[in-house]
């Protein structure tokens, strides 16, 4: 326990890096994922095909391999990015297809009958979309999206294996330096992760229950 | 699906032509992007030839390289994945039993422990097992993957059990089975079959996650190719080894993903019930959880 308290500044530094990775790559993944989802439901065949292939390939590539590419292969190709930036790019790309699928399943989850009913009572396109389809799609999208961000939080730990000094890397260094307090140190690291993942998980479960559309 | 056909009037000749034009323009833009990447890779690097130069790929003509990749790398990955998959399935059954136990003093602590495991990075668990239990890297990778995926599979099974009609259990009990017998002989086989697509999708995640072993020093595909072979043959071949590694991982994961979808379609045809889509493990889990919870409330209704 002493080892944890003594090294609290290091923990906080690592936690800050983890939060930075989470927030920046979360926003970037949201942007890329929205683009991919839009391509995937667009009437334009070539964009749809591209989005499908992108989703399949990225989703089936291990994150470790993506971050390996960012840390070791990109410099070979002539990139001058520092490791944290490279890791953010890798995490964003890796997370984007999961975001896209969450958005797409939300929009697709609204039954056709809802839109048909809206049209049959004389709603125009913008009314149908803004009053009927989007509010329902939104409700069905937010909980899975939160789950994607929980997964991203846990995935930031992989960046610790590739020269980014975040929580996992701090934990590993401290554990190697204090052989007698390994359990306390690693439990300390776990606590910091749980500080992010547990509240998000509770929020997702709560929204899911409250927003569930009864059919 | 909320198709655009419902939101708009049927597209006329003009809209169809616009859509075709957009498709061609979009296709050209994508092709242009890919061409740019290919040309950048093919361009010479200083004094060295580009990445498509045959001299960067000549080592792959040597069968010893491939033998090493498959015997050490692919087998290392598959061995860890298979062991962890079997253990995860067993743990999944155990966890779902404990979590749906009648006695609160079993159910509640189990729930807390399982939430703890779910909220923690798998990599941290691997490090913990490696350092605290000194199991060696193989068992650190296998145990962490088995625990983490066991929790998620257990959750799926629990949802599957909850979604069964109540009569299944009552029929078992009325035949004189004990509660456990009814669970094992009647309920689990059905729940397992219903949730099979989700479980296989989870095994794809498990297979992908074996590459975390690279960070804790387990010898698997990524380490063999990118660490041992690439440093033996030098940086000159780093990119080539990366491409080969990527292709091998994609081949393994995509075939398992396709298998999951095939099983899902077959389950749907046979039972006439749409199983939760294996599209994405997190969403599938969330849906499974929602089913389990809606079943526990009395007004949940039959599914």
Image: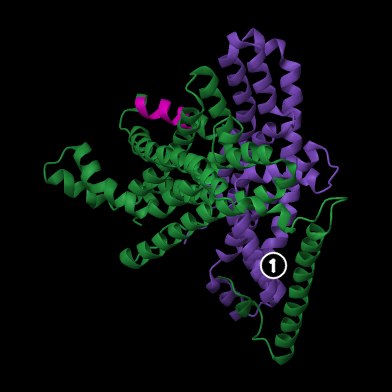
Chain colours: A purple, B green
Q: Quadrant of the N terminus of chain B?
A: bottom right
Quadrant housing residue A86: top right
Q: Would residue B231 be found to the left or right of residue B261 on screen?
A: right
The number of numbered discs placed on residues in the rendered structure image is 1
Q: Tag 1's secondary structure? A: helix
The picture places residue A210, in percent across and down from the top left corner, at 55, 48
Does the magenta run of residues contain B253? no
Check the image and report above or below for A179 versus A172: above
Which quadrant is home to the C terminus of chain B? bottom left
Magenta region, residue range: B106-115
For the residue carrying disc 1, how many other residues have a C-alpha within 10 Å: few (<14), some (14-19), or many (20+)? many
**For this view, does B42 lie left or right of residue A106?**
right
Q: Is residue B96 above or below residue B294?
A: above
In this rendering, the answer to whether A187 lies above or below B41 is above
The residue that label 1 is drawn on is A39
Residue in view at x 28 percent, y 46 percent? B188
The chain letter for the residue carrying disc 1 is A
Which secondary structure is most common in the magenta stretch? Answer: helix
- Residue extending furthest right? B46
Task: Say which of B265 and B128 sits in front.
Answer: B128
Give residue A96's position: percent from left, percent from top.
67, 53
Residue located 72% across and 52% down the image: B56
User: Horizontal and vertical percent for residue B40?
Assistant: 82, 59
Q: Position of residue A25 (x, y in %)?
A: 74, 44
Instruction: Answer whether residue A45 is visible to the viewer in this image.
Output: yes
């Amino acid at each position: 326990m002493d080892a944890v308290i003594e090294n609290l500044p290091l923990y906080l530094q690592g936690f800050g890096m983890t939060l930075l990775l989470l927030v920046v790559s979360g926003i970037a993944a949201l942007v890329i994922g929205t683009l991919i989802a839009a391509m995937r439901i667009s009437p334009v065949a070539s964009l749809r095909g591209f989005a499908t292939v992108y989703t399949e390939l990225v989703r089936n590539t291990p994150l470790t391999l993506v971050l390996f590419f960012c840390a070791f292969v990109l410099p070979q190709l002539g990139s001058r990015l520092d490791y944290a930036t490279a890791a953010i790019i890798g995490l964003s790309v890796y997370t984007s297809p999961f975001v896209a699928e969450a958005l797409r399943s939300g929009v697709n989850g609204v039954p056709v009958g809802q839109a048909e009913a809206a049209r049959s009572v004389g709603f125009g396109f913008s009314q149908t979309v803004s009053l009927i389809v989007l509010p329902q799609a939104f409700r069905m999208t937010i909980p899975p999206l939160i789950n994607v961000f929980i997964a991203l939080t846990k995935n930031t730990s992989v960046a610790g294996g590739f020269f980014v000094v975040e929580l996992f890397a701090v934990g590993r260094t401290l554990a190697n330096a204090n052989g007698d307090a390994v359990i306390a140190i690693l439990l300390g690291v776990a606590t910091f992760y749980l500080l992010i993942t547990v509240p998000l998980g509770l929020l997702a479960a709560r929204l899911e229950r409250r927003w569930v559309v009864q059919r | 699906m909320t198709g655009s056909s419902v939101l708009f009037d049927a597209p006329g000749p003009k809209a169809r032509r616009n859509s075709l034009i957009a498709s061609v323009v979009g296709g050209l833009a994508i092709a242009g992007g890919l061409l740019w990447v290919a040309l950048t890779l093919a361009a010479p690097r200083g004094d060295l030839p580009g990445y498509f130069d045959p001299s960067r790929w000549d080592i792959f003509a040597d069968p010893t390289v491939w033998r090493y990749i498959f015997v050490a790398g692919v087998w290392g990955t598959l061995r860890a994945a298979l062991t962890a998959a079997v253990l995860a399935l067993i743990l999944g059954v155990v966890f779902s039993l404990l979590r749906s136990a009648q006695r609160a003093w079993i159910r509640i602590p189990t729930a807390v422990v399982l939430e703890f495991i779910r909220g923690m990075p798998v990599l941290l668990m691997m490090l913990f097992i490696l350092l605290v239990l000194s199991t060696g890297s193989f068992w650190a990778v296998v145990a962490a993957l088995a625990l983490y995926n066991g929790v998620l599979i257990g959750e799926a099974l629990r949802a599957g059990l909850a979604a069964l009609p109540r009569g299944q259990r009552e029929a078992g009990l009325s035949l004189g089975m004990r509660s456990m017998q009814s669970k094992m002989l009647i309920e689990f086989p059905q729940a397992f079959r219903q949730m099979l697509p989700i479980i296989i999708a989870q095994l794809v995640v498990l297979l992908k996650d074996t590459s975390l072993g690279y960070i804790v020093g387990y010898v698997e595909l990524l380490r063999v190719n990118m660490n041992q072979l690439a440093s033996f043959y030098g940086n000159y071949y780093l990119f080539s080894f990366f491409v080969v590694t990527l292709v091998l991982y994609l081949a393994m994961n995509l075939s398992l993903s396709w298998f999951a979808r095939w099983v899902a379609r077959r389950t749907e045809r046979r039972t006439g019930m749409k199983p939760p889509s294996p599209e994405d493990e997190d969403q599938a889990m969330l849906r499974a959880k929602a089913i389990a919870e809606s079943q526990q409330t009395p007004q949940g209704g039959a599914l």
